[in-house]
Image (spheres, rainbow, N blue to C red):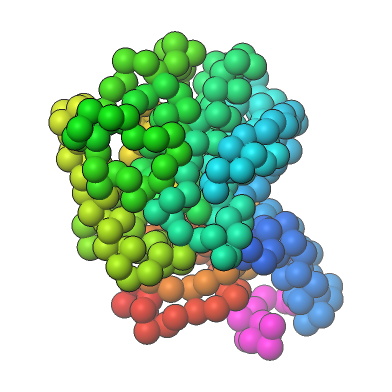
Amino acid sequence: MSALPKLLGSYKQDNIKILVSPSGFKESLDPKATADHIEAGILRVVPKATIVKAPLIDGGEGFVEALVAATNGSLEKLIVMGPTGKLIPSHYGFLGCDRPKTAVIEMAASAGLRLVPKDLRDPGVTSTFGVGQTIVAALRNGAQQILLGCGDSGTCDAGVGMAQALGAKFYAADGHELPLASGGKALVGLAAIDLSGLSPLLRNIPIQVACNWHNVLCGPLGVARIFGPQKGATVSEVEHLALAMDNFAAVYTQTVGRDVSLAPGSGASGGLGAGLMLIGAQLYPRYDIIMQFLQIDQLLDECDLVFTAEGGLDFQTPRGKIPAEVAQSQEARLAGGCVGRYHWSRCQSKL
């Protein structure tokens, strides 16, 4: 916080109003705790400042609880298959808004990286099956539409596990069905997709997905190569997963008649974006969806300075990360940032 007085510039420090609007620090601090710590640091330097806290959610951990709280909704508990195949407690929610009964789901609650023990981290075998189970539970509980957040995933199965939980079937070239929740590595052998068994509960149910619009399924910037290493994949495993995503995209095109390999958001949460498209969901930039509920633009307009934050500043930050979106907002008069770590050489050409 030593640079804060200089950052304040010509503002009167005893009258300044500061918005603290951070994302979380993955596996360390959630957005609310991050906001509390930044507030404490600011007040040590500018004790008379007025602090307004608006912790941000990007579709990952905290997505459900934040939107439920913002709309006076309700939280629902359930047991699902976690990313490693074990049963785990999870949750989803219902918004309290005056609109069709809307379930809000975060994939991280059933397939997040935090749920994968460090000695078991292999995105080639973890699964999104629990995400599909959560969708089924919400539909059985009367959801008329679904808002699903992507982020903080511990998987790279192209959403196949999720789709299997909803009744889709995936076949190898020999005609045998791929085992349930077998992970992304198995998709190298994928030859056919059968959607005829999808749950009838999905009919006429809009599914809106808040995701990082810049994440794509395949190519040099595909999900396996960009995010595989941070989920525990070795160099050889990354290449195997990249081939698996390429093959999934080819079979997807064969099944649906649309090339999903470079579709915006298709690579979100280990390719879950592509899997959600397969069952008829619509993908949207997460900032656009989230701001409908959090009214951050109004807060930006009312404050003199905004502090945002995330766990790491690197080449991914300008590619749809929430702190970058906040800093670039037209309503942000002056912005400062806090990071847990940064890789400047990898991001300076992007910022």
Q: Is residue 212 left or right of residue 302?
A: left
Q: Which quarter of the rendered picture does the C terminus lie within? A: bottom left
State the count of labels: 0
Q: Position of residue 174 (x, y in %)?
A: 20, 32
Vertical placement of residue 232 versus 330, above or below: below
Q: Main secondary structure of the magenta part?
A: loop
Q: Is residue 36 left or right of residue 182?
A: right
Residue at position x 74%, y 62% in the image: 33
User: Which region shows up in magenta?
Assistant: 1-14
- Identify which residue is drawn at 58% across, 37% down: 81
The quadrant holding residue 259 is: top left
Q: Quadrant of residue 320?
A: bottom left
Q: Is residue 150 above or below residue 194?
A: below
Q: Position of residue 135 (x, y in %)?
A: 54, 27
Q: Does 2 lie within the magenta span?
A: yes
Say which residue appears at 41% left-offset and 65% top-offset: 233
Q: Residue at coordinates 55% horizontally, 36% vertically from top-left? A: 130
Magenta span contains residue 96: no
**In x, y percent, where is residue 187?**
29, 44
User: Seen in the image, is 89 located left or right of residue 132?
Assistant: right
Residue situated in front as seen by the camera: 270 or 308? 270
| In the depicted structure, whether residue 212 falls above or below residue 80 | below
Q: Nearer the viewer, residue 195 or 36?
A: 195
The quarter of the displayed image where residue 113 is located: bottom right
Residue 198 versus residue 151 in the image, above or below: above
